[in-house]
Image (spheres, grey):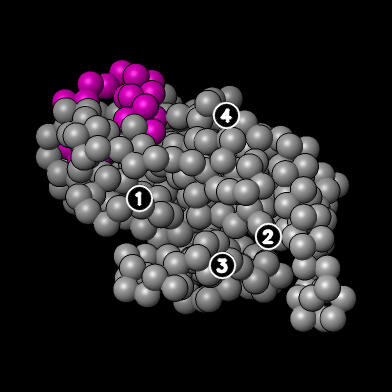
């Protein structure tokens, strides 16, 4: 079997940032207006009043301080509270493909590669802006890559599932070089009118170049092992899809955006992922003290802390389990890759780490890597 490696990662950051203070001001203005307009129904018990948000609430619940977005004014407009992203003509590059191309070029530059060196493209993200043609094929075409491309959707596990798929493709000789691109416009499926979720998501795009180890550059990361696990759950869900067009009255319902039972998710996902990591480590004969760093899914700071603690048997330091939540918020499947992209250059040859993503489905993935000598 051919050895696989991560040759480089790339990053595209949107042009706009929204602070907690800005988001809270917008949400609270909306909530106060809603409560005024429904005062009589609220007093009669027919409608539940909306609770106000605060920066303290957001940071305690998540560790998030700001987020990048593709459109700022639409989200902060209390009459809209959604990103304004207009349709583009079919002849123009779609917004997801545009983000993907930028991140892919960054990864290719870091690896010292030309697009013609790539055999395949996987666009792996939690939501796609259309059913077909595949965004991956559009990115492939825009970059001038031969071979083949496809889309992969598996909630917050999408990017890691894409990396695992690329590793398998390389291992069996189906490709020598695969780009995994994850354009996440999660602000578009977030409910900014919900106090429990209005702060969670941000937008971003990552790219990961997976290659055969014999062609990977000297600074690459050897892939020691990948493991995938899924377990059905309704606790994180988004019911929007093309079939909703058949029922126009249902399109605006809250369940067509991101919804979750947060406490249930925390209670069920933490042990599931922790046990999966430890099981995979045992298969690889990798003791916790040999794990130099963990790049975990950036869901919220409490979940990152508890999973790290269960794996190491003690509280992890920020160096051992870095977080990017304070700047980027939850970017769905891109989160663990951002952490890896931002916090991996300092590791020494031979040191080992874990890229781990988990989310709706439930879907979880563990990818153990070692810095090449």
| Sooner in the amino-acid sequence: mark 1 or mark 2 | 1
**Mark whose residue sits in front, 4 or 3:** 3
Identify the disc placed on residue 129: 1
Q: Nearer the viewer, residue 44 or 16?
A: 44
- Residue 363 place in picture, x, y as percent: 47, 65
Q: Please, is residue 170 above or below residue 309 in the view?
A: above
The residue pinned by badge 3 equals 254
| Sooner in the amino-acid sequence: mark 3 or mark 1 | 1
Query: Mark 3 near mark 1, Cβ–Cβ under 8 Å?
Result: no
Q: Please, is residue 330 above or below residue 278 in the view?
A: above
Between the C-alphas of marks 2 and 3, the distance is 9 Å
Q: Is the magenta stretch mostly helix, strand or loop?
A: helix
Identify the disc placed on residue 16: 4
Residue positioned 30% across, 53% down in the render = 130
Between the C-alphas of marks 4 and 1, the distance is 20 Å
| Snapshot quadrant of residue 99 | top left
**Mark whose residue sits in front, 3 or 1:** 3
Looking at the figure, which quarter contains the C terminus? top left
Q: Nearer the viewer, residue 243 or 209?
A: 243
The residue pinned by badge 2 equals 194
Query: In what element is the residue under mark 1?
Result: loop
The number of discs equals 4
| Sooner in the amino-acid sequence: mark 4 or mark 2 | 4
Between the C-alphas of marks 3 and 1, the distance is 19 Å
Q: Nearer the viewer, residue 41 or 175?
A: 41
| Sooner in the amino-acid sequence: mark 4 or mark 3 | 4
Q: Provide the residue span drawn in magenta.
A: 99-121
Query: In what element is the residue under mark 3?
Result: helix
Between the C-alphas of marks 4 and 3, the distance is 26 Å
- Label 3, residues with CA under 10 Å away: few <14, some 14-19, many ≥20: some
- Residue 153 place in picture, x, y as percent: 36, 58
């Amino acid at each position: 079997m051919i050895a696989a490696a991560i040759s480089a990662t790339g990053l595209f950051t949107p042009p706009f940032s929204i602070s907690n203070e800005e988001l809270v001001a917008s949400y609270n203005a909306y909530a106060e207006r809603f409560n005024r307009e429904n005062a009589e129904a609220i007093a009669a018990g027919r409608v539940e009043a909306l609770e106000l948000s605060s920066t303290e609430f957001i940071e305690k619940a998540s560790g998030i301080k700001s987020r990048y977005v593709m459109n700022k004014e639409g989200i902060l407009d209390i009459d809209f509270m959604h990103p304004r992203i207009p349709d583009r003509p079919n002849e123009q590059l779609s917004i997801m493909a545009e983000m993907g191309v930028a991140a892919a070029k960054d990864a290719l530059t870091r690896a010292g590669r030309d697009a013609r060196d790539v055999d395949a493209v996987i666009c792996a993200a939690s939501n796609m802006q259309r059913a077909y043609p595949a965004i991956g094929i559009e990115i492939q075409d825009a970059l001038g890559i031969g071979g083949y491309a496809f889309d992969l959707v598996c909630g917050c596990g999408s990017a890691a599932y894409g990396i695992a798929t690329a590793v398998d493709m390389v291992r069996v000789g189906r490709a020598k070089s695969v780009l995994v691109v994850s354009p996440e416009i999660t602000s578009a499926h977030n409910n900014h009118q919900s106090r429990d979720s209005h702060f969670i998501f941000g937008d971003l795009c990552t790219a990961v170049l997976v290659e055969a180890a014999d062609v990977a550059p000297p600074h690459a990361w050897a892939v020691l092992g990948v493991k995938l696990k899924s377990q059905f759950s309704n606790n994180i869900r988004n019911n929007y899809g093309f079939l909703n067009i058949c029922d126009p009255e249902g399109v605006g319902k809250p369940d067509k955006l991101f919804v979750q039972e947060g406490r249930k998710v925390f209670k069920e996902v933490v042990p599931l992922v922790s046990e999966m990591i430890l099981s995979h480590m045992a298969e690889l004969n990798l003791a916790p003290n040999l794990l130099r760093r963990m790049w975990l899914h950036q869901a919220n700071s409490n979940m990152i802390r508890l999973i790290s603690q269960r794996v190491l048997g003690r509280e992890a330091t920020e160096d051992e389990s870095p977080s990017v939540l304070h700047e980027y918020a939850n970017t769905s499947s891109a989160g663990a890759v951002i952490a890896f992209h931002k916090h991996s250059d300092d590791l020494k040859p031979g040191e080992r780490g874990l890229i781990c993503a988990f989310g709706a489905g439930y879907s979880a993935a563990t990818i153990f890597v070692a810095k090449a000598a």
